[in-house]
Amino acid sequence: MLRSMKQPSGAMAGYLRMTLGFTLIAAIFAFLGLSLASSWDDLQSEDLDVDPVLLVVSAVPLIVGILLQAGVWRRLVEYMDAGPEARLDQLPKVFLYSWVGRYMPGKVAYVAGRYFLGRHVGVPSSVLVGGIAYELALLLVAGSAFATLTVLPSVAVASETIWPYLVLPAISIAGLSALHPRVLRWAAQNAARFAGRDVGEATWILPQHAILWLGLSYAVVFALNGTAFYLLIVSVTSYSIGYLPLAAGAFALGSVFGLLSVITPAGIGVREGIIVAVLQVSMPLELAIVVSLVARVWATLVDLLVVGGVLLYDYLSGERMLWSALRGAAPEPESI
């Protein structure tokens, strides 16, 4: 009797979870489509000399950068010791599915999606929260350091002042210092003492070699994305190879601060503003604005392509992780 009463409620919860999940997915793609449409309308009035082959080629390093970032996040979770029940092989898909959540205002879907799917594949809540926090901090440090090496020298030569850009090395040095295990352990101990609790072993604190490896990996991601952005620019207008570092650094800065901008979906406006501010050192303001708009459409299409590819792979492989997560079903055990 009790068993028969529990089954309908469990089925109802599963249907509710699936309905909410598909509603959220539909909302994400609706906002993504609106983002694409708004930028597309602005581009209609511009006369661009587009090289279609180079435009397609420019998307390749951007796709590789996104996939690499998914792999780096899996490695980050491994460093934090997710435990024997975690399906680490599913983590890149967890990352890529949640990637489009950036297009929702507040980026709640970006974080909540990774948390929900991560829990479905057996990753503990504390590891997911810590992993997302570490990722944001490392992206900020790596992006600032990368921009210091790429943007700062170009600005020092071509601009009248470099003072605003000196904040970049300051952020990277301060961030790297704050992520040092000794500093984090000291902060955790003081916070625990203030709260009257025991900090324990603080196993969530990553070792120094892990911080350095992850930071360098994210720097490689920024280099790939920046190279893709430079190829995009030369596919629509003439642009000297000497400005490759400047373009790469501009896109890195725009991406990082766009991600940190909580109130704007996918950093809309923030990323474009930073790109324009940096690129106008090397091109007219009007052209920099056009390039930023083209980049918005281009990056959105790439995001659609990547997530579509993950959906197709997930379905054809038979794993269908997203579907099982939305249904509330337990993931299939990993074969040995």
Image: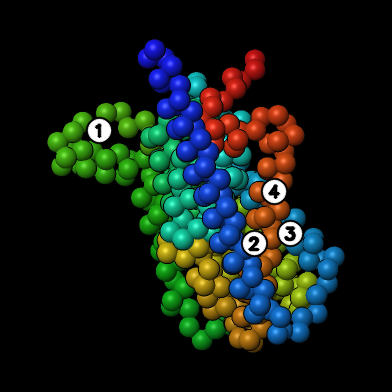
Label 4 is placed on what type of residue?
Gly
Discs 3, 4 touching: Cβ within 8 Å: no
* Near-viewer residue (179 or 234): 234
Compute the Cα span from label 1 to label 3.
46 Å
For the question of whether residue 304 can be seen, the reply is yes
Residue 180: image quadrant is: top left
Position in image of residue 325 (x %, y %): 54, 34
Position of 158 relative to 67 (above/below)? below
Which residue appears farthest toward the top when viewing the image?
1
Quickly name the residue at label 4: 308
| SS type, badge 2 | helix
Task: Categorize mark 2 by other alpha carbons within 10 Å: few (<14), some (14-19), many (20+).
Answer: some
Q: Position of residue 305 (x, y in %)?
A: 71, 53
Separation (CA) of disc 4 from disc 1: 43 Å
Query: Camera-side residue: 317 or 68?
Result: 317
On the image, the x and y values in percent for residue 322 come to 59, 37
Residue wearing tag 2: 300
- Residues at marks 2 and 4 touching, judged by CB atoms closer than 8 Å: no
Q: Is residue 207 left or right of residue 292?
A: left
Q: State the SS at label 4.
A: helix
- The tag on residue 199 is 1
The residue carrying mark 3 is 59
Q: Earlier in the sequence, mark 1 or mark 3?
A: 3
Give coordinates of residue 205: x percent, y percent.
38, 37
The quarter of the rendered structure image containing the N terminus is top left
Q: Specify the amino acid type for callout 2.
A: Thr
Question: Sequence order check: which comes first, mark 2 or mark 1?
Answer: 1
Task: Give the mark nearer the N terminus: 4 vs 1.
Answer: 1
